[in-house]
Amino acid sequence: MLLDRAIQLTSRAREYKLASELANEAQAFTTRVGQLEVPINELVLLRQLAMEFADNGVEVPFDNSVALGVVRRAKELLNAFIDNPKSLTEGDESFRQQFLPGIRSVSQQLKVALGFGWQQRVDKELEALPQDVLTALETISNYRAQIQTIRRCDEEAGQLRSSLPALGDVASRLAALTKTVTTKELAWQSLKGSELHDEVIDFLKKAGTHGFSLADLTVSITQWLSDRALLGSFQIRSV
């Protein structure tokens, strides 16, 4: 009788110990999933956005080599997990202080590269003219409506530039940019035939959209700018 009870007690103790160990393992795995879920999901979304950028011809200046260390460590963890699932719950210090920060660092660098690439694309299509140039033109009553349209286009471009497109919105944001560029060019075009020389209008239009080549600069343009003290308003940039 006593022996039977002792055997039952031993068996129950073993079952409890096994259940306790399984519960601890389950909790450890749950912790790992919680640690990985947010940074991995963020990286996946950013990667998808980068692919959408590429599909729409938006260049992203991201160096893939910065992710090599994280990729290598992820493969090591995966192989170790296949061999022994418990390995994922071991080496907590290395996991928290090296692997997770590595994932976050790659995400941050990719996000910065996406932002820079997007801003470059907007700037390539549409650059804002200096405010003093627009103000000088706005003093001419016949130009006021067109200049206000140009200002509005510059503001719209600034809004487009200020934030990354959401996933799935890249094409529509680029379409909005194209519409803004077209509206701005039409506003400049409507000034043709006025008291302002056409070559000056062409200069201002190009300087406020895709940029104006110094090789095309004429005496009439520089004279018009000099007369209004606007020569210093423009910047020369490399292409």
Image (cartoon, grey):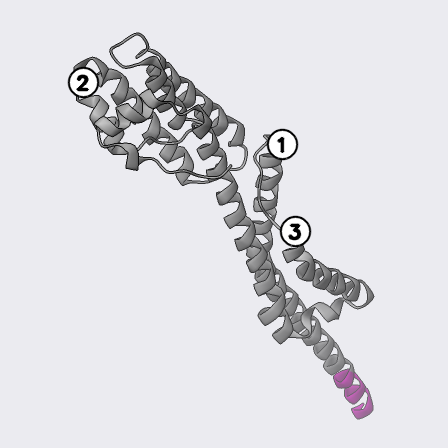
The total number of labels drawn is 3
Between disc 1 and disc 2, the foreground one is 2
Q: Are marks 3 and 1 in contact (CB under 8 Å)?
A: no
**53 left or right, relative to 20:** left
Residue, disc 3: 64
SS at badge 1: helix
**37 left or right, relative to 162:** right
**194 left or right, relative to 210:** left
Seen in the picture, residue 190 relative to 16 is either above or below; the reply is: above
Q: CA distance from mark 2 to mark 3?
A: 52 Å
Residue 152 found in image quarter:
top left
Residue, disc 2: 140
Q: Residue furthest front?
A: 219
Looking at the rendered structure, the kind of residue marked 2 is Ile
From the top left corner, tell me how far across and down residue 33 is, in percent.
Answer: 62, 60
Residue, disc 1: 55
SS at badge 3: helix
Instruction: Specify start and end residues of the magenta stretch as a single range.
Output: 1-10
SS at badge 2: loop
Q: Are marks 1 and 2 in contact (CB under 8 Å)?
A: no
Badge 1 or badge 2: first in the primary sequence: 1
Q: CA distance from mark 3 to mark 1?
A: 18 Å
Seen in the picture, residue 40 relative to 136 is either above or below; the reply is: below
Q: Local crowd at mark 2 within 10 Å, few (<14), some, or many (≥20)?
A: few
| Residue situated in front as seen by the camera: 140 or 230 | 230
Name the residue at 79% across, 92% down.
2
Looking at the rendered structure, the kind of residue marked 1 is Asp
